[in-house]
Image: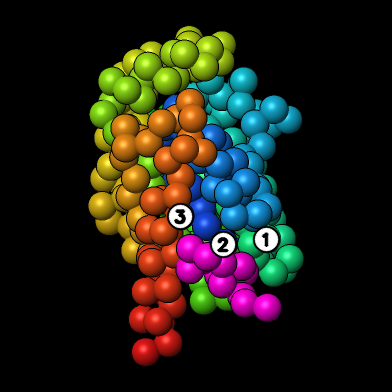
Amino acid sequence: MSNINQYGIPKDAVITVAGTVGVGKSTMTKTLANAIGFRTSYEKVENNPYLDKFYNDFERWSFHLQIYFLAERFKEQKRIFEYGGGFIQDRSVYEDTGIFAKMHYDKGTMTPTDYNTYKHLFDSMVMTPYFPHPDLLIYLEGPFEDVLDRIKNRGREMEQETPVDYWREMYDRYEEWINNFNTCPVMRININDYDLLNPDTSVEPILERIGNHIQTSRQYIKS
């Protein structure tokens, strides 16, 4: 029995979907997993004890929120690899430090002491040769206006009350982050290149690209 599916994607692969809020990570995660029979790992939002408080008071709760996310994502990533792979993951652990924590530090809503503590903890937990990294990070991108429309259309109350300037700031920081990210292979997908409402009809070319990226990167590592 082959360990590689028809698209060239290894059955033990771990693929992470990244991108700013509202870009369609959860939809892409579900679509890819359904198409190739992978399990899913979604960002846990509903039971997060800090999220609502954070949106009401960034300065008070930013450090608590980031520590919570770091612990949850660290445990989840370990679980995925201990299971043997075969997962599509909604959001990466790398975005927390590269975007969210740094944004709050730069804007003064996280103190230098808290930021340095968080960054040291992140580096000690994640940025080591012992921590398992994904085979591929899929980065979803598109025009800011389109992303903002998606945030408005999905109607989450805490997001509707967040100023547009915050989403703009996050969008720009995502672009800067991905342009400098090199922890694992990256494949970019423009959200306007597929039908979000009917993703199953446009997923096959994406799967073929994924297979090519992973095969190429694994051959590079072996050589």
Residue at which label 2 appears:
14
Q: Is residue 189 magenta?
A: no
Tell me if mark 1 has few (under 14), some (14-19) or many (20+) residues whose alpha carbon lies within 10 angstroms of its own. Answer: many
Q: Say whether residue 27 is visible.
A: yes
Mark 1 and mark 3: span between their CA atoms? 20 Å
Residue at which label 1 appears:
80
**Is residue 189 placed above or below 44 in the rendered structure?**
below
Q: In the displayed structure, does residue 205 sit left or right of residue 127?
A: left
Mark 1 or 3: the one toward you: 3
Q: Amino acid at mark 3?
A: Leu
Residue at 56% over, 72% down = 4
| Magenta-colored span | 1-13
Seen from the viewer's position, the closer of residues 16 and 207 is 207
Q: Amino acid at mark 1?
A: Ile
**Is residue 186 placed above or below 201 in the rendered structure?**
below
Where, quadrant-wise, is the C terminus in this rendering? bottom left
Overall secondary structure of the magenta section: loop
Q: Amino acid at mark 2?
A: Val
The quarter holding residue 87 reads bottom right
Q: Element at badge 1?
A: helix
Q: Element at badge 3?
A: helix
* Residue 223 numbered tag: none
Mark 3 or 2: the one toward you: 3
Mark 1 or 2: the one toward you: 2
* Labelled pair 1, 2 in contact (Cβ < 8 Å): yes
Residue at which label 3 appears:
207
Q: Element at badge 2?
A: strand
Mark 1 and mark 2: span between their CA atoms? 8 Å
Residue at 41% over, 31% down = 195
